[in-house]
Image (cartoon, rainbow, N blue to C red):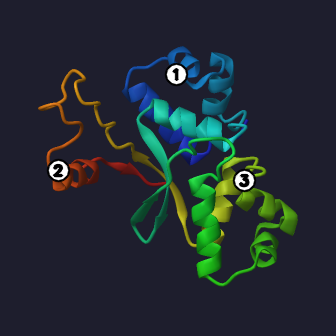
């Protein structure tokens, strides 16, 4: 048994702070309570970044990349066929730095085609550590941040004047910026 990944530890602490059981969270994520228990204890890692993302979303977080204290959000992809925004940001950063896939793959100890599969969306990194190392090579840190509030539909309970969301854009920016981030 090894110590859980810092992201997993943060999610476990968040679950406990919200007073939610492992069983409740596991049902929302679409897994068993036993599997979640193994993740939280460090005996196993989440099998996919999608699983980690769903776990974070259930607890009100989103996965983010940070670069010198600037948070770059990457929402979940709308469809499985679309490139994951998190991976698109990493590919964009590689291009900005003028690095080839071979250079980054070598630094990660991977074959070039594996990195190409990650960047194209054909495959995902197998572990959180792979994603963290990939982000690190490109100068990013992997963090959790509070998810932005979901805008309400017009006419839904709590909607103001038939309009969804805040009245002014500055209100939305202010609310999101006041939510704490969990840096790891």
Separation of disc 1 and disc 3 at Cα?
27 Å
Vertical position of residue 31 compared to residue 160: above or below: above
- What residue is rendered at 68% in x and 23% in y? 35
Q: Residue 101, how many percent across, how many down?
A: 77, 73
**SS state under label 2:** helix
For the point 45% across and 28% down, the residue is 15
Disc number placed over residue 36 in the picture, else none: none
Can you identify the residue that label 2 sits on?
171
Q: Which residue is mark 1?
A: 25
- Kind of element beneath mark 1: helix
Q: In the image, is 109 to the left or to the right of 71?
A: right
> Looking at the picture, does residue 18 appear above or below residue 27?
below
Q: Which residue is mark 3?
A: 121
Kindly tell me whether residue 3 is visible in this rendering: no
Instruction: Check the image and name the residue furthest to the left.
Output: 161
Distance of label 2 from label 1 (alpha carbons): 31 Å
Q: What is the quadrant of the N terminus in the image? A: top right
Q: Secondary structure at mark 3?
A: loop
């Amino acid at each position: 048994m090894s110590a859980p990944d810092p992201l997993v530890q943060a999610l476990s602490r968040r679950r406990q702070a919200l007073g939610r059981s492992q069983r409740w969270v596991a049902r929302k994520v679409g897994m068993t309570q036993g599997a979640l228990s193994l993740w939280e204890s460090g005996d196993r890692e989440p099998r996919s970044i999608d699983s980690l993302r769903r776990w974070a979303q259930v607890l009100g977080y989103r996965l983010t990349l940070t670069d010198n204290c600037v948070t770059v959000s990457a929402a979940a992809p709308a469809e499985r066929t679309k490139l994951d925004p998190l991976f698109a940001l990493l590919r964009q950063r590689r291009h900005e730095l003028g690095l080839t896939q071979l250079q980054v793959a070598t630094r990660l100890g991977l074959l070039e085609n594996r990195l190409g599969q990650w960047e194209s969306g054909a495959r995902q990194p197998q572990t959180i550590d792979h994603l963290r190392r990939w982000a690190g090579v490109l100068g990013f840190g992997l963090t959790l941040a509070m998810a932005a509030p979901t805008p309400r539909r017009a006419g839904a309970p709590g909607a103001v004047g038939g309009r969804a969301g805040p009245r002014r854009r500055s209100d939305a920016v202010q609310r999101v910026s006041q939510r704490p981030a969990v840096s790891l």
